[in-house]
Image (cartoon, helix red, strand yellow):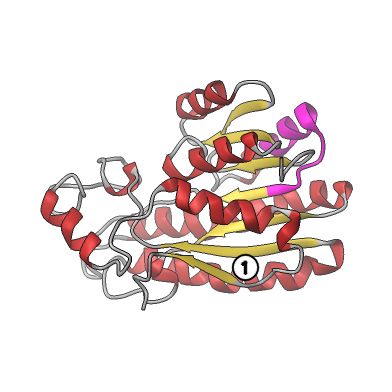
Amino acid sequence: MRLDGKVALITGGGGGMGGAQARLFAREGAAVCVADLFLDKAQQVAGEIGGRAVAVQLDVQQSTQWAEAVTRAEAAFGPISILCNNAGANFRVSFDEQTEDMWNLIVGTILTGSFLGTRAVVPSMRRGGGGGIVNLGSLASIRPGAGSPGYGAAKTGLVGLTRSTAASYAADNIRCVLVSPGHVDTPFIREDAPYSPNSAQTSINNPANYQRRQAAVPLGRLQTPEDVAQACLFLVSDEAAMVTGSMLTVDGGAAL
């Protein structure tokens, strides 16, 4: 019960990594607000958890929806003590092929969404005496590469946002960290979704793509959502009370 008495708001909570965090945090004693762009996905995860879990629909690019989500979570459980910014988007195309709309959706979801979420929860965290914020980075936070400039810019931008947040709110006992996963086996790189299109050329449902990613991991396997959730659990727990402004890479050595 490492999170006993804590209240977590988790974006992308109906997805692979967000769902794993929601389930793990609940097992460790937290009350959980499962937030997702797709309400049915959030409701499914909240229903699996049962008890102290609520589902809310949240477009992280909309500040009004953030305010509503925070109000809903506080009304159900009290001040928020944990925020996990997982919501993401990507279009796996070259610089020349990436359109302005693609750029805006990627950066708006990942970087602007995390900024808006932080602004929305800080007053609640202050009321509760502090808290922990986790931003979800990527290998692209370390080495963006040539593909999808919007994704590289957003994930690299989270490094600066995390450090700025940590410096801005340390006096309020609010910590902020960046968790950067490597190749994680989730629907984000398997399925074909409007916010993360995949084809046979990119999906890990294609054995060649799966093997290519696996070969890039020195520890020999793709990460699971649970691998990432365990790292997040440590960082939002009291055991990490002196960890802020830094990045934890959970990649099986892929960035080496």
Prevalent SS, magenta region: helix
- Disc 1: CA contacts within 10 A as few (<14), some (14-19) or many (>=20): many
Residue 165 at x, y percent in the picture? 69, 67
**Residue in the foreground of this view, choosing between 238 and 67:** 238
The image quarter containing residue 148 is bottom left
Q: Quadrant of the N terminus?
A: top right
- Decide if residue 93 is in sight here: no
Give the vertical position of 45 relative to 98 (above or below): above
Q: Quadrant of the C terminus?
A: bottom left
Residue 78 at x, y percent in the picture? 82, 35
Residue 100 at x, y percent in the picture? 34, 60
Q: Circle 1 is placed at which residue position?
A: 162
Task: Identify the magenta region.
Answer: 68-82
Give the vertical position of 122 relative to 217 (above or below): above
The image quarter containing residue 22 is top right
Query: Which residue occupies 58% across, 74% down?
Result: 160
